[in-house]
Image: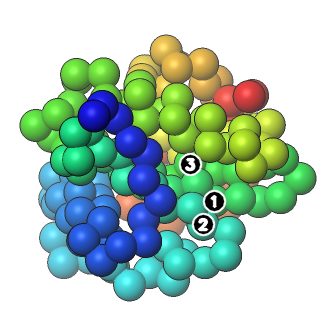
Amino acid sequence: MGYELANVTEPADWADFHRIRRVELFEARGRFGVYNDQHPHDHADFARPFLLKRDGRALGTARLDLFGNGRAAVRLVAITAAEQRRGHGRVMEAMVADEARELGVHTLFVNAVLDAQEFYAKSGWEPFEWDPSELVNSPVSCIQMRKLL
């Protein structure tokens, strides 16, 4: 069966999508009780939420936010802890980039947390300050990066 980058539309996929993000991006960093599974950006017209599955099992999440003019941001990227460092992140990054290209995107942006910067650099991303206001009041330290598609 292999990998699938599913558009998150079904209730079961939404449940997996939120569980992975809550556990890996919030609770694993000591941020309990702050994750909002009703955040309006997840359902906005500009947002494309994705769930990475392998053999039908949810492994990771990403959301592609379309800015227009060939630009988009990749947000809230996570792979389940049990599946990290097994190549799934590289697969998901490539699949999200392919989806972005199909949508006419030529430049991707990300706010990379410090422990993910090496991953992004190895995947062709470069440090690039694209919107400093995104980092104001951020609860975690990030560096802004971009990837030209």
Q: CA distance from mark 2 to mark 3?
A: 10 Å
> SS of the residue at dot 2?
strand
Mark 2: few, some, or many residues within 10 Å (few <14, many ≥20)? some
Q: Which residue occupies the foreground of this view, 101 or 120?
A: 101
* Residue type, label 2: Ala
Please say if the residues under marks 2 and 1 sit with CB atoms less than 8 Å apart: yes
- Which of the two labelled residues, at mark 3 and mark 1, occupies the earlier sequence position? 1
- The earlier-in-sequence mark between 2 and 1 is 2
The residue at 64%/50% (across/down) is 73
**Marks 3,1: beta carbons within 8 A:** yes
Quadrant where the N terminus is found in the figure: top left
- Residue 74: which numbered mark, if any? 3
Task: Report whether 66 appears left or right of 98.
Answer: right
Given the current orientation, which residue lies at the most extreme top position?
122
Q: Which residue is mark 2?
A: 47
Q: Residue at x 30, y 31 (%)?
A: 2
Residue 149 at x, y percent in the picture: 74, 28
Scheme of colours in the image: rainbow
Q: Is residue 119 above or below residue 18?
A: above
Across and down, in percent, residue 83 comes to: 17, 34
**Place of residue 142 in the rendered image (x, y in percent of width and height, measured from the top left):** 48, 44
Asked whether 65 or 144 is in front, the reply is 65
Can you tell which of label 2 and label 3 is closer to the viewer? 2
